[in-house]
Amino acid sequence: MKFLDQAKVYVRSGDGGAGSVSFRRERFVEFGGPDGGDGGRGGDVWIEAVSGLNTLIDYRYQQHFKAQTGVHGMGRNRHGANGESITLKVPAGTQVFAEDNETLICDLEKIGDRRKIAQGGNGGFGNDRFKSSTNQAPRHANPGIPGQELTIWLRLKLIADAGLVGLPNAGKSTFLSTVTRARPKIADYPFTTLHPGLGVAKVDGNEFVIADIPGLIEGAHLGVGIGDRFLGHVERTSVLLHLVSCVEEDVAAAYRTVRGELEAYGNGIEDKTEILCLSQVDTLDKEMRAEKLAALKQASGKTVIELSAVSQEGLTDTLRLLAKTIAADRDPPADDGDDGEEGWQPEGAYER
């Protein structure tokens, strides 16, 4: 199945049904009069986050959705039936934008979130509604109100706890396939990963979701390479796992390149907690490894984990640190309100 994280969709709510102009003409009925019924209300357009979906591929083949029109009113004060509403089903994490692809309409963060995006038109009044003492035989009725027509953009941002970032061939897909059951394509050429991938990792009884996105290169925020459009999939994560391959000639420059792209993208990604790993360390001898480790520490000013998905070195430590960081983000420590000052006492209180 092809991964699709953005789609343009055209929706229209149902028009309201027209009111009816009708009069009673029955044998042996002494008093006649208007008896036109109201039109039915047009159907609404809803959007809902449901389980079992992780891509917007359904909206690649169908882009037009229209709710049902309300039924027209009829004689004998028969009101028209309301039109049926329609619901667009999307994965959790989907954002709905207006036609300009910038104005956010709603954000469906979790399963069960539901939002009305187009309201159906009201049905028109029949002529029975217009009768009065001065107008006992009205010969007009209201037409139904037209429905709303919208062009919207659906943009999916994966719901994950941790995000993998780094240059192409930094070992992100290998790491994902080692610690989860995900099976991304792995090869020794740049941009092997073309679409984001998800996997569930487990350590010490704790489970969390890891998202792998295509590698970033210098100028990604300007559209170079695959660009930075997939960075939206790690916006909702608690922590970033930044892999820098020790195969890189200048690991410090590789680190600064990715950090620069994260800061250029913005949206809070640059402020997320970052765990830094020197990956693929099994390919170097001890002396070269120590040299690159020192260079990366100096460039980042952070503790660096030596990691190899092949030899399993540093794997458990990395997963435990990820789980700890995610747990801290999910359940931040409660603020006990102690600011170091003497506690408040009621007026007139005294010490015994």
Image (cartoon, rainbow, N blue to C red):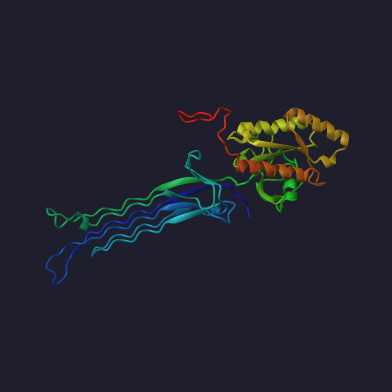
Figure quadrant of residue 166: top right
Quick one: quadrant of the C terminus? top right
Residue drawn at (62%, 31%) of the image: 264
| Along the viewing direction, whichever of 310 and 319 lies nearer the viewer | 319
Give the residue at the far bottom of this rendering. Answer: 28
> Percent position (x, y) of residue 292?
81, 32
Depth check: give the residue in front, 282 or 63: 282
- Which residue is drawn at the image coordinates 76% and 30% (left, top)? 297
Q: Indicate the quadrant containing the N terminus: top left, top right, bottom left or bottom right.
A: bottom right
Whether residue 115 sits left or right of residue 241 in the image: it is left
- Measuring 50% from the left and 50% from the top, which residue is drawn there? 113
Along the line of sight, which residue is nearer the eye, 310 or 28? 310
Image location (x, y in percent) of residue 218: 68, 32
Question: Which image quadrant for residue 141?
Answer: bottom left
Q: Residue at x 15, y 72 (%)?
A: 27
Q: Position of residue 289 (x, y in %)?
A: 84, 35
